[in-house]
Image (cartoon, rainbow, N blue to C red):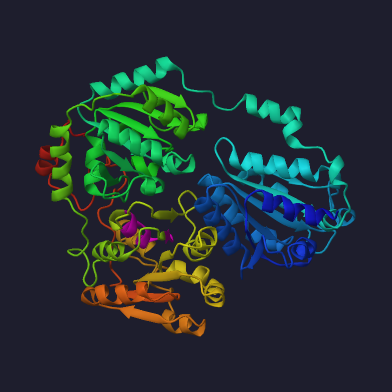
Amino acid sequence: MKLSDYVIDFIVASGVSQIYELPGGATTHLLDSAYDRTDIECVTMHHEQAASFAAEAYARVNGRLGVSMATSGPGALNMVTGIGSCYFDSVPCLFITGQVNTYEYKFERMQRQIGFQETDIVSVVKPLTKFAEIVVDAGRIRYLLEKAVFMAQSGRPGPVLLDIPMDIQRAEIDVTTLPGFYDSEEYRDICSGQCEPVDGQTLDRVIELMTAARRPVILAGGGVRTSGAVGELSALVEKTHIPVVASLMGLDALPSDNTAFFGMIGAYGNRYSNLTLANADFLLVLGSRLDTRQTGTRPETFARSARKVHVDIDPLELGAKVDVDIAVKADVSGFLEQLNEKLAGHTAGDLADWYEIIDGYRSRYADETAEKSPGIDPNAFMELLSAHCDAHDIICLDVGQHQMWAAQSFRLREGQRMLIAGGMGAMGFALPAGIGAVGASPASRAIVISGDGGFQLNIQELDIIAARQLPVKIFIMNNACLGMVRQFQDMYFEGRRQSTVNGYSCPDLAAISEAYRIPARGISELADADTVIAEVLSDPDPVVVDIKLDIGTTVNPKLVVNKPIEDMSPYLSREELERSMQIKLTD
């Protein structure tokens, strides 16, 4: 059979029903092999970066694999940001790029370029992928596809890339003679290095520390969702009643209405969440790399009175930024399954005093921005929006102030997902992510929350939403500036707003949306929001909502440089902070 036909068959067999792509001459054989098939479709985007973000969202929702495809040269390079996003956030995606014929490719020759649009994409993406290779032997296509998908999904997941030259795509192959990866010595060697079950003594020690604690806390990171451990985490909380805080990437690991859930920690976390973690005497970290956005710039002060257990599948993350008492190299799902088995028949300790303290934090330090900014309070808006959303909505956040307002105040319910561009933090993520999310889950609806800046980066994908009449609702938190950086400039650069206000402009987003055949609504007063949101969400078709905010709207609270996470701006008085702490203040 033709090799390009084999590639498409393989993608279908991997459980993928949509390929997100933008065509080019170097992918025409692959595109032709998908033509007129009923088991897979090509979703043709208007930019390769958007195609890669859509594939990332598809993978995160279906839990297995996303696929994106682009032509050689500029097409391949335009995917790099999306590839990096998958790498940093541990998302299994297969990226396929077309390439010039092997006889036109320079290989080791010193010329800059031989073939038209020839680019060594494999060398470009090596640092951002788990595996990347150019296919130069058609007889190895089965081996390389199997290896690529295995690498994408195993261990700490991530992106892989296969660069397939045009003469390889059109080659005829005998599928009965193709060697497979799963029969190889390489496969056996890789598997021998995979995580073993956690030994019983380590589990006993974890349980000993956990049950002795009077102020225990669980920190749920993105690894909880990545490893499929949401059910096991819920079971652990039900057994132990230990309160849970989340990193940004772990926000949809536990519903917000669970009485044990205490919000998001970190630089833009909820004040009550940071106080909860700061005062813990035991901390179980599940699948979080504990980066500076979580710990602040003084990691030595992070949960400083707690005995800490750090569980992560990547040994390079264990204890890398925060000293811990027990480091466990394990898949979070497997670890929690073993831990829950050990806790069979366990009677939860009396944490009533601890809950009284942290419930007090939550009641005293609710999310607030109104006293700092006139006009619509974005935290109040996020609470209102979340109250109107359905149980199976997929919330897609772009990057900027709106991401933090939603992370602080959007109350996730059972069955909802929240897709966030974390490590790469790329503006322009949310709109194409909404396309990929509903592609993976056609019965769901995507709620895209963006800012006026991020929305413009992939605004062209409105056409895909309109043409396919996808169930995507887009809410733009529009403060007519690049607000996150503008807030940074106001804090650290005496309000010199270069390129965020001075030099930045935003068009009439409602008019542009309507030009793309998507109706638009506007909200300029919070009093109008309830009615508009209800009407928009009752409409089955895509809608854009432009929410007008004051240009000076801020994210509060915020952790500034050289402060421990409990000491956030706007600052509590030293006396109030000291009264709130169960441990000593730092210098």
Towards the viewer: 257 or 372: 257
Question: As displayed, is residue 542 above or below residue 149?
Answer: below
- List x then y, in percent, for residue 126: 66, 44
- List x then y, in percent, for residue 101: 86, 57
Towards the viewer: 491 or 277: 277
Q: Residue at x 52, y 46 (%)?
A: 88
Q: Quarter-wise, where is residue 304 in the image?
A: top left
Q: Quarter-wise, where is residue 288 in the image?
A: top left
- List x then y, in percent, for residue 59: 55, 52
Number of marks in picture: 0
Question: As displayed, is residue 177 above or below residue 386?
Answer: above
Question: Is 401 included in the stretch rendered in magenta?
Answer: yes
Would residue 120 be seen by someone viewing this image from the given angle?
Answer: no
Quadrant into which the C terminus falls = top left
Specify start and end residues of the magenta stretch as a single range.
395-407
Q: Residue at x 41, y 31 (%)?
A: 336
